[in-house]
Image (cartoon, rainbow, N blue to C red):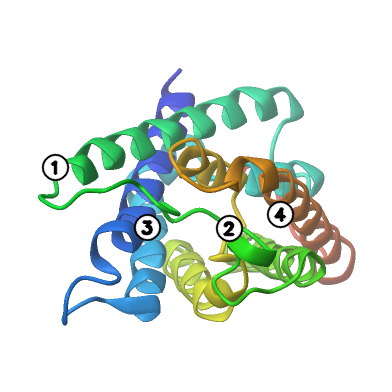
């Protein structure tokens, strides 16, 4: 159970820190952190959680990462469903806590978009479904390539969380205007339950695209980049 609890806590931290920065601090009067600050916050959540919990569970905190590592031969299939359930629970709990905090604001008038992901009218830049699908697939594939490369035995020891955290920061810097950045179905699910928009109706894309992207990234790394390397473990 330690592994599942670590995934729950790590995903909670990712959603609370990343989405919390978007909900509470991004547009704070005059001193808001903006897209750049939110991007850094998401990267820091993964970096810190991976150092704190990665030795327990492998530090996935993301169903798309779990799928990708399974396809890439780094993760046992029997653990896939328990990991995903733990991740989604952690994300929902984080969103719930954020919801209660937001209600304490003096001029609270509703949750609005609540850092959810979307396309069309729900996209920050009004990008289409096709654009959202493509960018989520491509960026999640790149994320898996970074994860698998950084955690390979030939890679410098102890630096994987830094590379992974910086990769997630870069991903957000690129794609917040398009989809508000998912690359993580659990992150998308947790906040969608509390939004006042139609985010739940678009949630399917933020499961399908990241998982497809994660699988593509894992296949690319495993078949084209991973040579003569022992890849047991996560």
From mark 3 to mark 2, how far is it between C-alphas?
11 Å
Quarter holding residue 131:
bottom right
Q: Which mark is residue 210?
A: 4
User: How dense is the environment of label 3, judged by Cα within 10 Å: few (below 14), some, or many (20 and up)?
Assistant: many
From mark 2 to mark 1, how far is it between C-alphas?
27 Å
Task: Give the residue at mark 1.
Answer: 104
**Who's the residue at 14% across and 42% down the image?**
104
Q: Which mark is residue 18?
A: 3
Comes first in the chain, label 3 or label 2: 3
Q: Nearer the viewer, mark 3 or mark 1?
A: 1
* Residue 174: % across, % down: 57, 80
* Residue 7: % across, % down: 46, 35
**Who's the residue at 69% across and 74% down the image?**
127
- In the image as oriented, which residue stretches furthest toward the top? 1
Pointers 2 and 1 in contact (C-beta within 8 Å): no
From mark 2 to mark 4, how far is it between C-alphas?
8 Å
Task: Give the residue at mark 2.
Answer: 182
Pointers 2 and 4 in contact (C-beta within 8 Å): yes
Judge by depth and name the residue closer to the eye, 53 or 175: 175
User: How dense is the environment of label 2, judged by Cα within 10 Å: few (below 14), some, or many (20 and up)?
Assistant: many
* Residue 28: % across, % down: 20, 70
User: How dense is the environment of label 4, judged by Cα within 10 Å: few (below 14), some, or many (20 and up)?
Assistant: many
Comes first in the chain, label 2 or label 4: 2
């Amino acid at each position: 159970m330690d592994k599942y609890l670590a995934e729950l806590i790590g995903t909670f931290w990712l959603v609370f820190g990343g989405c919390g920065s978007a909900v509470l601090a991004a547009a704070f009067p005059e001193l808001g952190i903006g897209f750049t600050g939110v991007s850094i916050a998401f990267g820091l959540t993964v970096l810190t959680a991976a150092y704190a919990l990665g030795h327990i569970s492998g530090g996935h905190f993301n169903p798309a990462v779990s799928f990708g590592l399974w396809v890439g031969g780094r993760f046992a299939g029997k653990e896939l469903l328990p990991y995903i359930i733990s991740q989604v629970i952690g994300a929902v709990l984080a969103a719930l806590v954020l919801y209660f905090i937001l209600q304490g604001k003096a001029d609270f008038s509703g949750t609005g978009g609540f850092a959810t992901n979307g396309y069309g009218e729900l996209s920050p830049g009004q990008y289409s479904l096709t654009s959202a699908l493509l960018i989520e697939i491509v960026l999640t594939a790149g994320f898996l390539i970074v994860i698998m490369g950084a955690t390979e035995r030939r890679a410098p020891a102890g630096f994987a969380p830094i590379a992974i955290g910086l990769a997630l920061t870069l991903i957000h810097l690129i794609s917040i205007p398009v989809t508000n950045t998912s690359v993580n179905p659990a992150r998308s699910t947790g906040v969608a339950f509390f939004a006042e928009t139609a985010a739940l109706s678009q949630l399917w894309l933020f499961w399908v695209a990241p998982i497809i992207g994660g699988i593509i990234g894992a296949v690319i790394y495993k078949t084209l980049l991973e040579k003569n390397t022992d890849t047991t473990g996560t």
